[in-house]
């Protein structure tokens, strides 16, 4: 079965929601344009990053869950890393080159430029406050993703052996890290609470969701699907309430208090995403159709490049002297247009070549083909 056929529409829809939250947040943050009563969603939209990491954990482990529970072909480690490189490197390198050229005056010296670029090329820029957001703010999440890829084979092996205990261990490491930075009074420091250990529980929740969905999706009855639909709706309501709470803290006490609150409550984000994803995937068809509607799925397809470019585009528009409203309303379609172009001109063709390459090599006798179902 191909990647396109094996895709889960609900997870695509959730990724579409995640990128919509982040784009709205960046557009509001840079332009200053507010959207009335609904602006609380924009103010807390940075939490869309947690949803991204959850979905990443799901998609990374999903083919391994299928291999273990359904007898599907298991991707090799080599294939895993080649697929990840084909997915993230072309668009990332393009953005890195352009942003480094556009913002070259921000580098203190040629040596500083070399350090910044080298740290981003090695995906270690998140480890130093000086390089964390040194070229473009959103690139820190790509560093976290790449770092998780490095440890994924070990985590995956442990998950295949004992998923619930492994998830508990990942969540415990995340909670221990958050308690540690709180005791060091770094819980309101953006660089400190956005390191990989803080997100291990979120990645793990995504992996556990993949395991659960594969394990039970063919055994749920219609009555159980109706109950799961109610659970999905309840999880969505809790998620919106959480966004409102975060936005309210930001307004009342400032961004530092907001960050500290998120750091203290991040342990709950993984389980909430897990409930939302599992129950939505197994819910009645009508609910799944809403979560996986076509506009959200399209946003999912271009989400990586939309994430890379949207902040800089709204910043460039605002810097050109446009009004807050005009910057906001031009940035969103402009970002979608750029992301669509990069996705279908650069990212998708490379991914298609990467997907075909094992079959070509198998035909020439160089090694056996290994079907891969992860995105």
Image: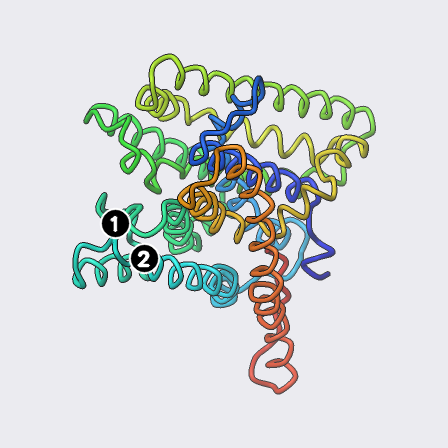
* Percent position of residue 339, x then y: 56, 54
Display colour scheme: rainbow
Residue 131 numbered mark, or none: 1
**Which of 318 and 157 lies nearest the eye of the viewer?**
318
State the residue at coordinates (16%, 62%). 111
Circle 1/circle 2 CB separation < 8 Å: yes
Q: How many marks?
A: 2
Q: Secondary structure at mark 2?
A: helix
Where's residue 223, x and y in %? 81, 24
**Can you give x and y, in whole percent of width and height, for residue 331 in the image?**
53, 43
Question: Within 10 angstroms of label 1, few (less than 14), some, or many (20 or more) residues?
Answer: many
Instruction: Give 98 or 165, whichever is nearer the viewer.
Output: 98
Whole-percent x and y of residue 326?
A: 54, 37
Label for residue 200?
A: none
**Which residue sits at x=63%, y=46%?**
299
Q: Quadrant of the C terminus?
A: bottom right
Tell me if residue 222 comes above or below residue 127 in the rendering: above
Mark 1 element type: helix
In the depicted view, which residue is nearer to us: 32 or 335? 32
Q: Residue at x 69, y 32 (%)?
A: 280
Marks 1/2: CA–CA distance: 8 Å
Of 3 and 302, the residue lying toward us: 302
Q: Is residue 281 above or below residue 125?
A: above
Quarter of the N terminus within the rendering = bottom right
Query: Is tag 1's residue or tag 2's residue first in the polypeptide sequence?
Result: 2
Residue 333 in view in this figure: yes
Q: Is residue 356 left or right of residue 111?
A: right
Q: In which quarter of the view is residue 183 placed?
A: top left
Location of residue 187 with respect to 358 vertically, above or below: above
* Residue 11 found in image quarter: top right
- Mark 2 lies on residue: 120
Judge from the rendering whether residue 200 lies leftward or rightward of residue 25; answer left or right. Answer: left
């Amino acid at each position: 079965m191909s990647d396109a056929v094996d895709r889960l529409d609900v997870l695509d829809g959730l990724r579409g929601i995640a990128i919509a939250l982040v784009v709205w947040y960046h557009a509001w943050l840079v332009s200053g344009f507010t959207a009335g009563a609904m602006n609380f969603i924009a103010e807390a939209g940075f939490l869309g990053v947690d949803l991204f990491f959850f979905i990443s954990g799901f998609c990374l482990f999903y083919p391994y869950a299928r291999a273990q529970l359904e007898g599907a072909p298991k991707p090799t480690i080599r294939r895993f890393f080649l697929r990840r490189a084909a997915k993230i490197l072309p668009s990332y390198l393009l953005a890195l080159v352009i942003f480094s050229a556009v913002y070259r005056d921000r580098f203190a010296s040629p040596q500083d430029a070399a350090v910044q670029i080298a740290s981003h090329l090695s995906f270690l820029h998140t480890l130093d406050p000086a390089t964390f957001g040194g070229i473009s703010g959103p690139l820190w999440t790509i560093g976290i993703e790449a770092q998780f890829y490095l440890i994924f084979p070990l985590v995956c092996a442990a998950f295949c052996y004992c998923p619930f205990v492994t998830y508990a261990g990942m969540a415990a490491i995340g909670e221990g890290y958050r308690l540690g930075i709180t005791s060091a009074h770094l819980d309101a420091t953006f660089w400190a609470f956005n390191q990989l250990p803080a997100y291990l529980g979120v990645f793990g929740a995504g992996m556990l969701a993949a395991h659960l969905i594969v394990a039970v999706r063919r055994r749920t009855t219609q009555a159980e699907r109706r109950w799961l639909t109610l659970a999905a709706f309840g999880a969505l309501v809790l998620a919106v309430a959480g966004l409102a709470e975060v936005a309210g803290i930001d307004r009342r006490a400032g961004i530092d208090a907001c960050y500290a609150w998120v750091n203290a409550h991040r342990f709950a984000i993984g389980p909430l995403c897990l409930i939302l994803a599992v129950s939505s995937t197994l819910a009645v068809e009508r609910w799944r159709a809403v979560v996986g509607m076509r506009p959200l799925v399209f946003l999912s397809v271009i989400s990586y490049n939309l994430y890379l470019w949207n902040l800089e585009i709204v910043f460039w528009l605002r810097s050109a002297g446009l009004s807050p409203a005009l910057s906001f309303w031009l940035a969103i379609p402009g970002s979608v247009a750029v992301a669509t172009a990069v996705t279908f001109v650069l990212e998708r063709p490379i991914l298609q070549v990467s997907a075909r390459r094992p079959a070509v090599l198998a035909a020439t006798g160089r090694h056996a083909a290994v079907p891969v179902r992860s995105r």
